[in-house]
């Protein structure tokens, strides 16, 4: 059984910020990540909205965070998937069988986009396929783009995209939106938006980058091609919280509920970043959550 | 009357993050600061705990944030002190008489060090009285100095001063420190530090510069004079929220209360960063607050 002051699950911006702060406070810190450090931003080819860092790519930004955490003594283990977690007793076990124990655990496992699972989707991530209008919208100035989905996020992000794109097609598999009424009203008035109902995406196509999407009308069965430079997919997100199911209080979607000190329903267990139930999920909010979880868990507050 | 989509008060990390996000979303943004942009971190000679940026100084970090906000079109006006604010109607007036109106207002005015309010304090600012050891420590090489306060900051700054001063007296009004245990342990081991308990500062004295401070023991009532060349005052902070007094809900210390969306008690008015009632105040939490205030005020959530 290996012992640490604090074990942090997930080496994205939230986990790395927590590691930096806790290690700098002199604590013995371990960060476990099931893959390579970085979280979702590792895949962002351009990050231009992180204050204090001029346009960079996600990989570079994360590498700096990793270096900083390590420079203060934090230990970071990639490819260390935790398969068992007893949060009350603060014990963890990884896939390859190592057992760990800590005074506090900070869960920073993030969330993930629900995928369409159609041909072209994975191939064109970062080259026209996006899961974040706030991040990537400005790259589609003057272009026509498609938004897939019909919930609040899809409609909000579609409206946001009209600040940049010349036209935004909203492709939804039903004949009406799931989004709230006031959002729908705003959206229907927006002259740059056009709605394509009862339609599913069959594939995303292009040479090197997205050029069109193939749609199938669910009522008529007809397949059509829609020429767009971008496909923004907002069919929901899922928190990476399955491992803790039944142990922690979560909201109805599985996001972990905390107070403003990032404390969960179990003393000594914190949640930070995208896995936490919170209204905004950005790099800044992730690093802030990690900071707060660290300072509170180190006894500063 | 000049009109903007959003006016941000204060050009520290919170205000600049909000400006970056809102300008990038295509909004017409004005940032007003009563001095030079930067807030408190402008004075930090070393920032090593902002994830994604390796050791830097506060000035450089802020200059990058200013450049980023401007690159997306935000307008930043330094030396524009707001002297009148009608938050319900979203109108502001600056000292030189310009009137402004906006759809939303983001208050990011920060906080400041609390003063002792004793004779000599104001007179000797910059001539022995200081609120920043990092800034002024090097001027006290080989001298004996006093630190007033007993919290984390007081103890950390006192330890920092031992790099320069020949002796650092820590004057605290209680019989034990409020600082975290690990800081206390480090401080008690430092041979250059001496603790004066149960004592209040009655006056700061000298001819042209600080030469001594007069202390009163709270238990015995005895007054003594302590010969020091510097008095560093770290007795807590006050929010820069006076201008909005009576208009917004605040906590008992005057910090503005918001929900997790940074919304204050007035619709369309947000608070972000150190002026907000929150458990942790760091650069990360400031930029996160600014991000959330921006995204919510731009209608994204």
Image (cartoon, coloured by chain):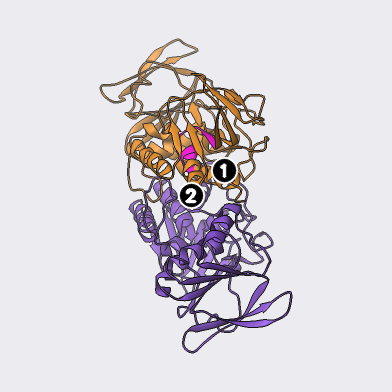
Chain colours: A orange, B purple
Which label is found at residue A197? none
Tell me if residue A15 is in the magenta stretch: yes
What residue occupies the far bottom of the structure in this picture? B207
Tell me if residue A25 is in the magenta stretch: no
Q: How many marks?
A: 2
Q: Which residue is drawn at 32% across and 28% down?
A: A127
Q: Residue at x 61, y 53 (%)?
A: B181
Residue B4's place in the image compared with B170, above or below, is above
Left or right for A234, reference B88? left
Between residue B300 and residue B191, name the one nearer to us: B191
What residue occupies the far top of the structure in this picture? A221
Q: Which chain carries label 1?
A: A
Q: Name the residue under label 1.
A: A293
Q: In which quarter of the image is residue B195?
A: bottom right
Residue A301's place in the image compared with A133, above or below, is below
Which percent across, then down, holds residue B133? 47, 67
Which percent across, then down, holds residue A207? 25, 21
Dot 2 alpha-carbon crowd within 10 angstroms: few under 14, some 14 to 19, many 20 or more? many
Q: Mark 2 points at which residue?
A: B284
Q: Quadrant of residue A117?
A: top left
Tell me the CA gap for discs 1 and 2: 12 Å
Which percent across, then down, holds residue A213? 36, 21
Is residue A123 at least partly visible in the picture?
yes
Residue B5's place in the image compared with A11, above or below, is below
Start-end of magenta stretch: A6-17
Which percent across, then down, holds residue B4? 45, 58
Q: Which chain carries label 2?
A: B
Between residue B295 and residue B56, name the one nearer to us: B56
């Amino acid at each position: 059984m290996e012992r640490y002051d604090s074990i942090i699950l997930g080496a994205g911006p939230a986990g790395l910020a927590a590691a930096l702060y806790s290690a700098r406070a002199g604590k013995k810190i371990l960060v476990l990540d099931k893959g390579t450090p970085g979280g979702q931003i590792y895949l962002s080819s351009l990050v231009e909205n992180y204050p204090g860092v001029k346009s960079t790519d996600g990989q570079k930004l994360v590498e700096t965070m990793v270096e900083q955490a390590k420079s203060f003594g934090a230990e970071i283990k990639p490819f260390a998937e935790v398969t068992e977690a007893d949060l009350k007793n603060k014990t963890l076990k990884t896939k390859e069988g190592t057992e760990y124990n800590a005074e506090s655990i900070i869960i920073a496992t993030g969330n993930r986009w629900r995928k369409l699972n159609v041909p072209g989707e994975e191939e064109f991530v970062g080259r026209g396929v996006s899961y974040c209008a706030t991040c990537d919208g400005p790259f589609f100035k003057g272009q026509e783009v498609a938004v897939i989905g019909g919930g609040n996020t899809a409609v909000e992000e579609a409206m946001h995209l009209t600040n940049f794109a010349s036209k935004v097609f909203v492709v939804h598999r039903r004949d009406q939106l799931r989004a709230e009424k006031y959002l729908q009203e705003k959206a229907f008035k927006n002259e740059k938006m056009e709605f394509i109902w009862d339609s599913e995406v069959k594939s995303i196509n292009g040479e090197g980058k997205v050029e069109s999407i193939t749609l199938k009308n669910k009522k008529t069965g007809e397949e059509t091609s829609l020429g767009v430079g971008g496909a923004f997919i907002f069919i929901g997100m899922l928190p990476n919280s399955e491992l803790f199911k039944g142990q922690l209080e979560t909201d109805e979607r599985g996001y972990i509920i905390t107070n403003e000190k990032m404390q969960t329903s179990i003393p000594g267990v914190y949640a930070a970043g995208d896995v936490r139930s919170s209204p905004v999920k950005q790099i800044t909010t992730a690093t802030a959550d990690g900071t707060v979880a660290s300072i509170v868990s180190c006894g500063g507050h």
